[in-house]
Amino acid sequence: EEAISAVKSYKGEVSGKLKVGCSTIPGTFIIPYFIGSFIKKYPGARVNLFTGDSRDIVNKVASGKLELGVVGAIFRNNKVTFEEILNDELVLVVYPGHKLLRKKRVTISDLKKYPYVNREYGSGTREFVEKYLMENGLELSDLNIVLEVGSTEAVCHAIKAKVGVSIVSRRAVEDDVGCGCLEIVPFHNLRMLRHFYLVENEVRSKSTVYKAFVNELREWSSSEEENIYKV
């Protein structure tokens, strides 16, 4: 099978397997939609999609276990490069009836007053929130963190169970907000915007399916539909 794929690659045909790693948000809510359109255009391609936290994905691309990745934070590694590829917005999410919904002006400092559900170490969301807090005069240790979990889905379930509030990707809660299970509380004069990054191994050889995947992803991500969250 690998020999056949190599011959097709030599001829310029897009076929064969590709191992792609994504952090939670792009791996769950974005990249699967892109892969659907990619496979439709290149039916000879096969994509294995792995999810993990951003740090883990970066390390696996650097070690060669994954061919490329899409992550929510930059973790420096001299074996990989990072390229801004997608946009995202983080929002404060609470359960229906929460006190913050009755507050006229919610600031980042208000987070200190309520139990908070946090992502695990290595999460791109956690990394971004921690930096954002520091830029606004706060530290993660200032929050009343009552629970740390390993996925965005677990965060959302914890909020529904009234364990606490959290900051998560808007993409991850659109369905729950739409059905009234969760609610978004906007910060006063503040939007939390971030990038997702394409991670590539500098020295790894690039197959035809690899090159097609990256080129199509760049084109797809630059479309108006996929730039809802302007940074």
Image: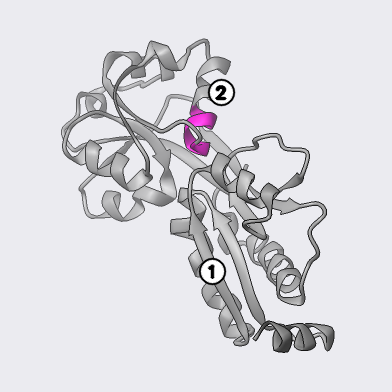
Residue type at numbered disc 2: Lys
Evaluate whether residue 89 shows in this view.
yes
Residue at the image point whose x is 62% and y is 61% from the top: 224
Vertical comparison of 58 with 5: above or below: above
Residue at the image point whose x is 66% and y is 57% from the top: 68
Residue 131 numbered tag: 2
Q: Quadrant of the C terminus?
A: top right
Q: Nearer the viewer, residue 188 or 96?
A: 96
Q: Nearer the viewer, residue 150 or 124?
A: 150
Instruction: Estimate how packed mark 2 is, as few (under 14), some (14 to 19) or many (20 or more) residues with alpha carbons within 10 Å.
Output: few
Residue 48 numbered tag: 1
Relative to residue 82, is residue 220 drawn left or right?
left
Task: Mark 2 or mark 1: name the one nearer the start of the chain.
Answer: 1
Asked if residue 94 is among those painted magenta in the image, a careful observer would answer no
SS under mark 2? helix
Residue 67 numbered tag: none
Relative to residue 168, is residue 175 drawn left or right?
left
Residue 39 found in image quarter: bottom right
Vertical comparison of 103 with 78: above or below: above
Residue 204 found in image quarter: bottom right
Range of magenta residues:
123-129
Q: Quadrant of the N terminus?
A: bottom right
Q: Where residue 196 appears, x then y in whole percent?
A: 60, 47
Q: Where residue 227 appears, x then y in whole percent?
A: 59, 55
Residue type at numbered disc 1: Asn
Relative to residue 134, is residue 198 drawn left or right?
right
Vertical comparison of 161 with 131: above or below: below
SS under mark 1? strand
Q: Nearer the viewer, residue 124 or 150?
A: 150
